[in-house]
Structure formats: C-alpha cells, structure tokens
Image (cartoon, rainbow, N blue to C red):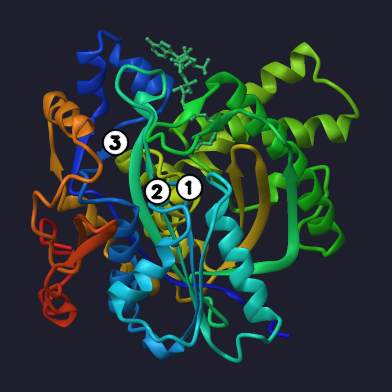
Amino acid sequence: MKTSVGIEALAIAVPRRYIELEDLARARGVDPEKFTIGLGCRRMAVAEPGEDSVALAATAARRLIKTSGLAPERIGMLIVGTETGVDHAKPIASHVQGLLGLPRAMRVYDTTHACYGGTAALHAACEWIASGAARGRAALVVCADIARYGCNTPGEPTQGAGAVALLVSDAPRLLAIDLGISGASSRDVYDFWRPHGRREALVDGHYSIECYLEALAGAYREWRALALAAGLIENGADALPSARLERVLYHVPFGKMARKAHAHLRRVDLEDMRGGRLDAAAEAAEAQAAAQSFARQVASSLRLCAEVGNIYTGSLYLGLAGVLDAEAAALAGRRIGLFSYGSGCCAEFFSGVVGAEAERAIRAARLAETLAARERIDVAEYERIMDLPPDRPLEEEPPPGGFRFAGVREGRRLYVAGPEAPADAARERRGGVAVGAGV
Ligand code: CAA
C-alpha cells in the first residue's frame, strides 16, 4: 500500500480565442458590473469547432508529457473526465491514446458525472496507485469540456472551454492527496443536464446553486469528521475547522459561486459549533470575517478561472493550477481543501498537502504563456463562431504542440496534429516565460 499519492505535474489547454465579459454585457444591454461583480466573471474562452473536447484533451496531455518529461511507458492508466464527449461509445481517452501514440498496455476510459467526472477519475487513479495494482506506473487524468448554454440565455456569461491534464503518481510533487479522508454527497436532482443530441446544456440556474451549496455542506461535514479524527485539523476555540486549511478550492462555474460556497462552508462550521442559527450580532461579525477569509483562503485560486470561464470537469483543477502558480512556494508543506461539484448531483470534499517542489513543477507548466498566446475577439465574431455547425471542417491549422478536429469522414472523426512546440531548453535559456509564443 502506497501512502504518498497524488498530482505530480499538470498542464492546461485553452481555445485560442476569448471575449471580455464587459463587451458581452454591453452587447446584451446588461450593466457590465452584473457580469464582472455580480457573477465574478472577467473573460470567457470561445471554442471553435476545431477545438472540440478531444482536441483540447489531447493538446493538454501532449503538453503535460512534454513539460513533465514523462516517459509514455510509465503510463498504465488514461482516464478522461468529461461531460461533453463526442461519441456515445468511443471515449475521448481512446482518441487521446491514438493521437499521442501511447502504449497499448493500459486501461483507457472516460468518466462522466457532469463536472464531477474529473474528480472521479483522479480518485480512481489515486486508489489504483495506492492499492499497488499500478505496479509503480503512473496515471494520466485529463479533464476536458466545452461549457455551452447558448447566446442570450442567463447561462451565457458562464460559458468557457478548456482542458487540464494531471499526471497522477507516487511522486506527488504538486499535491499529495489525503487518501481515504474525503466526504461525498450525492442526490438525484435535475439542476443541470444535457439530453442526447443537444449541444447546449439545460439548467435550472438558481436551483443549481442551492443543490451545489447543499452538497457542499454534506460532503464537507463528512470530510471534517474524518480529518478531525485523523488529526489533520484541530477543533479549537480560536479558529473554525475550515480555517485550519491554508487554502480552500471550489468548483468554479462562475467566480461568485466560490464566494457563496466559502461563506456557506464557514456557516456550516459556525452553526455546528453553536448548535443553531447565528443571531444578528454574530451575522454582522461573520459578514466581515467571511470577506477576510475569502481573500486569504480562496481568492488566488480564481485567477485562471477568471481568464477562461467555466470548463466543467477541469474547473477545480484550473483553480489548483492558479493557486499553485501564484503561491506554491508559500504553500509548500501546507494542507489545502478541494471541493468538486457535478450537477445531477455528486460532490466530494477532499484535501491534500502541497509538495516541497511544487513551485518548480508548476513553473514547468508555463501557464501564463499559454494564456498570453490567446487572441481577444469581439461579440460579432463570438456569435459567428457559436453559429458554426459542430462538424465544420478545419478552418485553422493546429498550433505547435496542439491538435485540431478536422471533420468527419465515413462517420469517423479526424484530427490533425500541429508541429512540435519549440524546444523547452531554448526558452529557458532566454529566461522565464516567453509571453506571446505558440503553445
Ligand atoms: N451590479 C452588480 N451585481 C449585480 C448587478 C449589477 N448591476 N445586477 C445583478 N447583480 C448580481 C445579483 O444581485 C446576483 O448576485 P447574488 O447571486 O449575490 O444575489 C448576481 O448578480 C447574478 O444575478 P442574477 O441571479 O439575477 O443572474 P441570472 O439569474 O441572470 O443568472 C445564473 C445567474 C443562474 C448563475 C446563470 O448565469 C446560470 O444559470 N448559470 C449556469 C448555471 C450555473 O453555473 N450554476 C452553478 C451551480 S451548478 C454547477 O456548479 C455545475 C456547473 O458547472 C454548471
């Protein structure tokens, strides 16, 4: 039984274009502050037909293999968490295996439960390694999605697209997961769903927020009981149990949701400690304390999410990438909490310890470079892209290091690969991140 298991390295892939939500608000006749402050959104990735979930997943995985120096023969499992698959039977993971030329001696499959699919994959991979069944091999977990509600819908400003690839192993340089210390909460609800054949999700928006918060309370309470029993956190008069976590990362469908979630998490702690609801004086004190706690425990995890929007399965892990990119050195050896929510619904609260080498490992992912290579588009161009048929043949050549969907022939999806990305060593010699370079 391995006891140190978790995320060794990560990489992201995002569409090459994005819009500013202030531009979208003006075009829709909405006060821009509703989107930027009310929803806490800044920019939204816009995926073209060539940038489907397979292309995004394969690009992120290719980048991870390159930047982490992972030898493909080390991989014994490849799982893609997604809710925007391209086929009812053939998994995205199988496309990724083929496009990357990975070895055949491995388990390859997709996991689906709305935005929870990536977390299901991460835990399956961790438990496979911890059990010894992996025989020293590593797992590749990729979360890839296109969040799409359609133009002129309430969900429109909360769209996005992207992929996060995670290398899961017994050398967790980024985050060692607290194995067995996790709380789950699930229930059969219709808060968000996407019937077969539809590109756009259907959502009961305000109800979905209620379901998210209720699931958070259930999952957190179970995690808290286990973490207290295991001595991972303390229950003292000076701080709430959740405040013992150095950072708390949430699934981020839109930035404000993380703020609502964090306030709710603290309320669960407070009400459980007091044995009932807060009185008026306690409410007033808590409003201020929650804002301060949000700034300390949550804010840094929203930086990358605010650049890309909702990416469904990958959203929590984009938050992880953001927090490590911002402050990995300061967090080395510290415990953080993570909350994953998938509509429908299934949620999990778990925790892990940031690795001593996390700063070096996250720098290799060159996150700023990937985001800086994007192009801003206006609302007219965004609407043109939203109107394109999903199987439209290739408009753009794939970028260096990337993949693009290239059309359907005899019912089979075709993909093309871009040339190798420029050598890492040459860039490192120039010093730091080469903003504006290709992927
Ligand atoms: N200035 C500042 N703030 C303003 C404002 C202005 N001019 N106008 C409105 N606001 C505020 C509102 O007060 C509100 O804030 P609070 O929530 O703190 O009260 C906020 O802006 C949003 O306003 P509305 O509630 O009126 O917005 P809406 O009804 O148009 O849509 C939504 C909001 C329901 C989240 C919608 O965007 C949606 O359906 N999104 C998709 C569903 C979703 O993301 N659900 C999240 C939970 S489910 C999940 O997490 C899984 C997943 O990934 C989908």
**Residue 83 image label:** 1
Say what secondary structure mark 3 lies in: strand
**Mark 3 or 2, closer to the camera:** 2
Q: How many marks?
A: 3
Q: Earlier in the sequence, mark 3 or mark 1?
A: 3
Residue at image x 35%, y 26%? 157
Give the residue number, with chain letter if any, for mark 2: 145
Residue 412, given in percent of the width and then of the height, sits at 28, 60
Q: Which amino acid, mark 3?
A: Met
Q: Residue reaching furthest right?
A: 275
How far apart in space, not on screen, are marks 1 and 2 (Cα)?
A: 7 Å
**Which residue is more in the foreground, 188 or 276?**
188
Quadrant including the N terminus = bottom right
Of 77 and 232, nearer the camera is: 77
**Rendered location of residue 222, percent (x, y):** 80, 49
Q: Residues within 10 Å of mark 2 (few under 14, many from 20)?
A: many
Which of the two labelled residues, at mark 1 and mark 2, occupies the earlier sequence position? 1
